[in-house]
Structure formats: C-alpha cells, structure tokens
Image (spheres, helix red, strand yellow):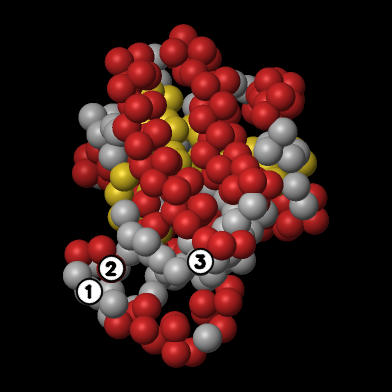
Amino acid sequence: MAQKKFLESLYDLSGKVALVTGGGTGIGKQMAQTLAKAGASVVVTARREKLLIETVETITSQNGNAEFVTADLSKTEHISVFIEQASKIFGTLDILVNAAGVNLREVAEDITSVSWDKTLSINLKTPFFLAQSLVPEMRIKGWGKIINIASLQSKRAFQNGLAYGASKGGVDQMTRAMAEAWSKDGISCNAIAPGFFPTELTATVFKDKQLFAQNAAKTAIGRNGELQDLEGITIFLSSSASDYITGQTIFVDGGYTSK
C-alpha cells in the first residue's frame, strides 16, 4: 500500500489542467488520452472540430475529463484570446503539450517562402508563443510542464525534409532555451522526439511496406512505434517525477538514433 501511494504521489495528475495542441489526431490525441487517464483535466485544440469531438468523446467514455476549443493557432496574434478561453474551462493551465505540426515533404528546390514560413510558424513559432503566454500563471504557482514535440529530424537529415528538419532542429534548441529562461521558476521544459509512429504525417511511410520494414530494421528494438509507446514518457514529463529534468530532448524511437 505504501509503495502504491508513493507511485501515485509521483505520477498522479489529479487537479492538474493540460492543454494539448493537435489533439484531434495521432500523437496529440494519444497524449491527451494519456494525461486524462493519469487524472488531468484536458483541453484539446486543433482546426478540425469533428476530430476534437471524437477525442473528447473517447476520453469521457473512459471516465476522463476533457473539453475542446477549435482554433487555428498559426495565427499567433489570437493566442492570448485563445488562452483566456481555454483557461475558463477547467481553470488555469499547468501542462502544455505542443503536439500540432506540419510536414509538407517538399524537395529543397520546391520550397517557397510561403511553405517555409508555414512550416516554421506552425512547428516552431506557435509553440513558443503558446508557452510564453502560459508562463505568468505557471510562475505564480511555481510549477508547470511544457512538452514540445521534436523529431528524428532534429538530429538527422531526411529526404524532402529540409524545412521540416530546420523547424524541428529549432524545437530542440528552443526547448533548451526555454528551460534556461523559465526553469528557475519551477517550469520544466522538455521535448519528446518520436521515431516512426502511425500518424497523419507518416501515413505515406506506413502504407509503403518496404519503407515500413526498412524503418523498423533501423531501430535497435526491431519495430516501428505504436502510439501506446508514448504513454510512459507523457506521464513522466508531465508529473512531479520529472521535476529535476529540464531542457532535454528525449528520443522515443526504439533506438533508431542509437545505431
């Protein structure tokens, strides 16, 4: 019984409020469900309301607590209004998961200033300004968790991924800089760098049997990721168990980057 209470004190998120961007699909949806299972009240946001409704219904069917706010967060001038709206649902936010992202998969010669700006705005600019807007309330509480989503391309160069890789390399460095700026106030800032997981962004890879097998073979474990593989790291980085860990990018890639 004592052991159970000890573990609960480390990982229980009851009373915490989380905001998950990109919460309608893939990694964002999985992380939102995981946070709710750990006891957090979760606000999910994205552009497509239908998918957000499905996420909320999934969480509530499992006795979790969730609501959604539809928003296009690439328009950073609207972030302050959005945060005010999101904070009225369950109270001020304790946890931010920046899971929304875009990968246009353009060859270097086809990248335009428009596609470059879109990629860096959604993947890098929006996560920063969302985090910045939440820092004052987290600072008052003396506690907060910011989780960014990095990538294999934060460290590796892939074909047709120049702009995406630049944005995710930026996420890696931004996470360290966030930690330097805000961790003294009790706000942990870390990033998860997933390997190959089945999401909208990787659908073409998972449909190609040869690529699917090649990517699995490049891991130390010998398989591609399953969304459930993100549950442990999500709870860990969102809970008091990770209070002395900040500025880190943790690769959840089955050992892909270790080979």
Which disc, if any, is residue 78? none
Q: How many marks?
A: 3
**Contact, CB < 8 Å: mark 3 with mark 1?**
no
Question: Which amino acid, mark 3?
Answer: Asn
Closer to the camera, 91 or 9? 91
**Contact, CB < 8 Å: mark 1 with mark 2?**
yes
Quote the CA–CA distance across marks 1 and 2. 6 Å
* Residue topped by disc 3: 160
Q: Residue at x 64, y 38 (%)?
A: 43
Of marks 3 and 1, which one's residue comes earlier in the chain? 3
User: Relative to residue 250, is residue 130 depicted above or below?
Assistant: above
Of marks 1 and 2, which one's residue comes earlier in the chain? 1
The quarter of the image holding the C terminus is: bottom left
Few, some or many residues within 10 Å of mark 1 (<14, 14–19, 20+): some
Q: Decide if residue 202 is on the left or right side of residue 217.
A: right
Quote the CA–CA distance across marks 3 and 1. 25 Å
Which residue of the protein is positioned furthest toward the front in this rendering?
A: 109
Task: Tell me where residue 155 sits by quadrant.
Answer: bottom left
Closer to the camera, 163 or 96? 163
Few, some or many residues within 10 Å of mark 2 (<14, 14–19, 20+): many
Which residue of the protein is positioned furthest toward the top in this rendering?
A: 140
* Residue topped by disc 1: 220
Question: Which amino acid, mark 1?
Answer: Ala
Quote the CA–CA distance across marks 2 and 3. 19 Å
- Where disc 3 sits, the SS reads loop
Q: Residue at x 31, y 22 (%)?
A: 180
* Residue topped by disc 2: 256
- Where disc 2 sits, the SS reads helix
Closer to the camera, 136 or 209? 209
Q: Residue at x 20, y 64 (%)?
A: 258
Q: Position of residue 78 (x, y in %)?
A: 73, 26
Q: Position of residue 67 (x, y in %)?
A: 70, 40
